[in-house]
Structure formats: C-alpha cells, structure tokens
Amino acid sequence: MKKTDALIIGAGPTGLFTAHQLKLIGLDCEIVDNLDKIGGQCIELYPDKPIYDIPAVPECTGEELTNNLLDQLKPFNIKFHLSERVEEVKKEDNNWLVKTSGGNFFLTPNVIIAGGVGSFEPRKFPPKECEKFENKSLFYSVKDKNIFKGKTVSIFGGGDSALDWAIELSKESNVNLIHRRDEFRGAQATVDKMHALVKDGKINLFNKYQMANVHGEQTLESIDIKHDNGGIKNLKTEYVLGFFGLIMQLGPIANWGLNLNKKTIEVDTEKFETNQKGIYAVGDICNYPGKLKLILSGFHEGALAARACFKLARPDEKYRFEFTTTSTNLLKRLGKKE
Amino acid sequence: MAKITYITSDNQTHTVEVQNGLTVMEGAVQNDIPGIDADCGGGMACATCHVYVKDDWFNKIPKKEDGEDDMLDMAFEPKTNSRLSCQIIVSDELDGLEVNIPSKQA
C-alpha cells in the first residue's frame, strides 16, 4: 500500500502540470495512466500536430509540449505508474483507497481525475461474435509474434501498425491484409514495401473489404469479409489482428458515484471538486458552466485543485499563497536555492 | 440557417435548425441528439462523430479534406458514404440535409 498526499489519474498535460503545482506547494503525488507513455491525448492523438494556443508558446507539437512539461517537473521526484488503469476508488475513513489494474493500492486523501475523455482502449471489430475469440485468436495488439509462425493471419487496418505487422509476419506466416479502401495512411516507404510483397505473393491483399463475421466453435476457423459492393468472401484463418487505433472510454470512472454529464464530471469552480469530497476532476473530463476544452483551462483547473488538496493533506497547517519569483520556500523546492 | 435531419440507428428522426458556420456535429451536440460522441471536440482526431450522408447529398456537400479518410478508417462500420460530421460546415446550401447516425461510434 502506497500512501501519498494526492493521486493523479492521467499523465496528459493537465495531469503533469497539476503534479507540478502539488509539488510546488509541498505535497507529494503519484500519477497513474493507462497508456504505456506519458502525454495523454497530446502523444496519442497528435504528437506531430502543432498547437498554437498555449500561452507564451507560439507554436509547439503535442510531443514538444509533453517534453517541456516533463522538463518543468525535473526538480521534483514524481512516480509514474504507466500501463495501469484505476479500477476502484473506495472511501476509507478520511482517505480514498485506490486500486489499479496493475495490483497497486494507494491510500490518499485526494484523488485528482485528469483523465481527458477516459482511458485509451483499442477500437474493436463491429461484429459482436468477435468477442468470443478476443485474446485467444483475435487480437488488437501483438504480445508474442511467435504464436503466428506457420499459421494464417488476417490483418485488418490501413495504418503503420497494420502494414508493419503484415510485412513482419509475412516472413513466417501466411498473411491476408484487409483494408476498407485502396489508399493506406502508413508511411509511403512501408506502403511500397507492402505492395512489393503483394506482387511477390507473400501478402494477399483485399482492398475495399471489411470484417463481416467470424466462424468456429472452440477455435477460430474462418472469417467472412464484405466488399463495398456487398459481395462476401470467406477466408480460412487461424488468427485475426485488428489495428483501428485507440478510442477513449470512460471505463470504471462511471462507477465511482460521481455526478456525470454525458462523458464529463460535474465540478465546482473553486476547488474543481466533484460531488465526492476529496475527488477532483480537471482538464477535458470536467464540466462546469462555461467550460472550455483547452489545455490552458486544464492548467488553471489543476492549480486550483492542488490548493484544495492542501487542506485535506495538511489539515493542521495553513496554506499560504507565494510567488516563485520571491518565495525562498518555493525556490528551495525548485532546487534554485540551498 | 439550415434544417438538418439526423436519423438514429433505431430510425428516430430529429430535425433541427442549425446556424450557418457551425458544423453538423455541433448541431447534433447542441441539440442533444443521441449517437454523436465527438470525443475530441471537432479536431478530426477521434472518428466518434461519424455519420452516413444520403447519396444525393454526399456529392453535393464540400468534399473530404486531407486526413478525414484516414480517421474514417478507424470509425465503426464505415461505408462509402461515411463522413465525419465535424468536417461538414453548415450553410444555406445544406438546408434539408439528412444524415444517418451509426449504431455505435466505437
């Protein structure tokens, strides 16, 4: 069991800056994120797209913004728990007991949800029947490529993941590549390489087809794919891989007794506290009159939530507002003064 | 102003007036029409405002720009008449537009 002054859910820009604000006022914190990397939507959705509305930063990409925020956190020692999703939040006296999918337990008076629009999960095949084979013969990521050796693998998707795996697995497997249109959005060199392998008969390419159904009792035997013109083709296959990117799902947050409005959480605008004392929501996931889904709003919300955390983490102390330009305390915490 | 008709997958019809300059996605969200999630808020980064545009309208409205088809690759059950509703900007010319909302966004 880990004890901390505040637990942040979400390592996107809002979560990172909230951590900065907590550490600056002398509280410790840890961060949990379901992704395997830091940066949230900035890294997952638009690492290379420029952002033009961060105050005092005329232009930066999602990746640069993330790196700058991490730089800003350098004076502080912050523990990240990546590839872990928060599953349960339970009240325990004056604290919250938080359990993650990685088996970690946290005891903390403050939980700050900086979760964007929820955690990123793979997008799945539309036919319901596909669930039956999920994680057995139908996967949305590759953990061990050796299981595909000598087998038939049907890969769906038009991006780099689908193309890279089609090329890689074509060395030792029989590969079908299925995509909904003629154009691929992967890197041109990868697309060219794939087409060369199609020409050599190493990859069977099915353009303008999509998944229609799966067949098999215990194990997957074949799939039906449907052409834009309605024609259906049956492919014998032992494995299926789907690469349709990630989608944000609210997930277990929906079960924590918070006031939800569509996929957002209602908060007050003084502490950014939810209807549960000691649980806050900041960034894209929070909702209040006038809410703007901008990164700059997330920074403001995190700064105020951090001050609210102080009261619950240090009930016997009084929080005093200070500036980083002049406060000896703050400069010491930032490592700028002995 | 344009009258836009949104038809949900269970065949419920919602006709609303949407101001020029807003997107078809915003028209749905502001009028609480179910089935359009728009997780990313209109940034063409999530494919959860996916709609099907009736064939006669599909060729009339402004064409897809770079990147929209890439996102549609990830949409739930894309078809040849699929569009992201956040990329369709409402104008007088769109008066009477009908779009079908898929059964799910993801």
Image: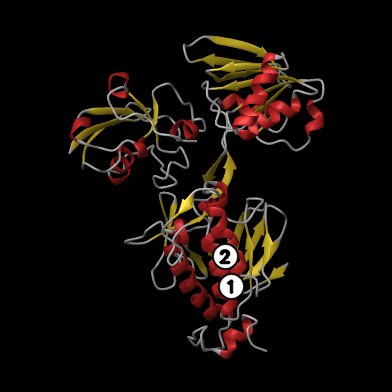
Task: Provide the chain ID for the residue under circle 1.
Answer: A
Residue B37 falls in image quadrant: top left
Estimate how packed mark 2 is, as few (under 14), some (14 to 19) or many (20 or more) residues with alpha carbons within 10 Å.
Answer: some
Q: Position of residue A16 (x, y in %)?
A: 57, 64
Q: In the displayed structure, does residue B72 sit left or right of residue A144?
A: left
Q: Identify the residue position indicated by label 1 in the image.
A: A109
Lateral position of residue B2 relative to residue B59, left or right: left
Q: How dense is the environment of label 1, judged by Cα within 10 Å: few (below 14), some, or many (20 and up)?
A: many
Which marked residue is nearer to the observer: mark 2 or mark 1?
Answer: 2
Residue B71 position, x and y percent, is 48, 35
Residue B105 can be seen in this image: yes
Gap between marks 2 and 1, in whole Å?
A: 25 Å
Q: Are marks 2 and 1 on the same chain?
A: yes
Q: Which residue is mark 2?
A: A69
**Which residue appears at 48% of the width and 51% of the height?**
A50
Mark 2 and mark 1 lie on one chain; the one further toward the N terminus is 2
Is residue B48 placed above or below A234 in the rendered structure? Answer: below
